[in-house]
Image: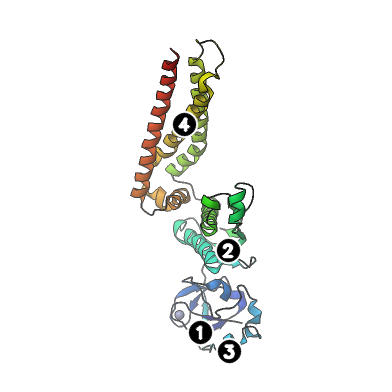
Amino acid sequence: MLQIRCPHCDAKMSVPESMVGRSGRCGDCQERFVVRQPAQAGRSADSVAMADGESPFADVDSAAGELRGSAARQIEVDESIALEADDDPIRITADPGFPDVPRDVVDEVCEAVENRLRTGLKEDVRDADLIISIDRYDPGSRLMRYMFPFISGAARVALSVSGTINDARVDIETRAARYMGAFGGDSDKMLEACLQDCLSNILLDLDTASGREPAPFAQFWNRLRIVRWVVAGLAFVAYAAIFGAMRLPKPGPIGAGGEWFFLVIGSLFMAVSCLGIVALGPLLFAPADFLLTDPRGMKLMTRAGTKSPAVMKAAAALIFLVSCGGVLLAVILLLESRQGQM
Ligand SMILES: [Zn+2]
């Protein structure tokens, strides 16, 4: 048996260990909560913890043993209060496989998944039984990143979610890494960025697994992901070709006078500017719903560090205008280089 505390009214009760990951209704206050193993409870609002200061993911069986004997004895379970079985169709369990993951990270992941299933996908998910596992949570080495960026010391996070959604099997695995940052990059920030990347991938896959059809703008945004790189590539090639062609009337090698340098810089400038226009222009017309509730939009908001669609759009408008200026500059460079020849 596992001794737990109701997170709503603090009533103490004992429940079978098979209840871990399942939800029940407190016999005292009638509020519903999910039973988690004490080590996974942390600061989560809907979880319960009895033993503080224990090593994370300690075996529950040892609750009455020597290790946590003193903590367990201090708990006086009220036998009259029971956890009533609840037919909650959504069950999320954290797999305590990886010992070095901070509790609040485990909670953050569980809560993000639970929120998506319970609110974002409320109409699509009839039942879910998922096990979440943090397979890797590695800060890497700031020193190594500083000395050998892109080669060693990367911060890495890997998550997996397995189980069933609407009785269909789900197996999601995702990983993210950060290879460099200013002075090697702050490990905590890099881990957080990796975690957010992984989370947004998982939310997207949960949407797919639940059978949710993306909203029209989300579908358009998906297609745009490829289109914008194609546009940038075409812009690079076209600019380079035009730049080269304008040199044709003049005999001699093109390399003279640093022209190669201008050709490459101008083409890159053109490509990046076109990328900015194609990527951010449509965002100005994105419905607030996309930014607030679609995993793709939520990822953009997280990256921009804002919760307000208006701020997000203002930032997008700014980058869009800068990109338009970039195209203009690239064209001026082209015309200047032509004038220089005459
Ligand atoms: Zn209660």
Q: Nearer the viewer, mark 1 or mark 4?
A: 4
Mark 3 to mark 2 CA distance (whole Å): 33 Å
Mark 3 to mark 1 CA distance (whole Å): 13 Å
In this rendering, is residue 328 above or below 337? Answer: below
In this rendering, is residue 44 above or below 77? Answer: above
Q: Which mark sits nearer the N-terminus, 3 or 4?
A: 3
Indicate the amino acid at tag 1: Lys
Mark 3 to mark 4 CA distance (whole Å): 69 Å
Mark 4 to mark 2 CA distance (whole Å): 49 Å
Mark 2 to mark 1 CA distance (whole Å): 26 Å
Specify the color scheme. Answer: rainbow
Q: Nearer the viewer, mark 3 or mark 2?
A: 3
Q: Which mark sits nearer the N-terminus, 2 or 1?
A: 1
Q: Position of residue 108 (x, y in %)?
A: 51, 63
The reply to whether residue 25 is in sight is yes
In this rendering, is residue 300 above or below 137? Answer: above
Within the image, what quadrant is residue 142 found in?
bottom right
Q: Nearer the viewer, mark 3 or mark 1?
A: 3
Q: Which residue is mark 1?
A: 12
User: Any mark on residue 269, and which?
Assistant: 4
Q: Secondary structure at mark 1?
A: strand
Q: Which residue is mark 2?
A: 129
Q: Which residue is mark 3?
A: 73
Q: Nearer the viewer, residue 57 or 260?
A: 260
Within the image, what quadrant is residue 52 found in?
bottom right
Q: Nearer the viewer, mark 4 or mark 2?
A: 4
Indicate the amino acid at tag 3: Arg
In this rendering, is residue 190 above or below 12? Answer: above
Mark 1 to mark 4 CA distance (whole Å): 65 Å
Verify CB contact (< 8 Å) between mark 2 and mark 1.
Answer: no
Q: Position of residue 233 (x, y in %)?
A: 52, 30
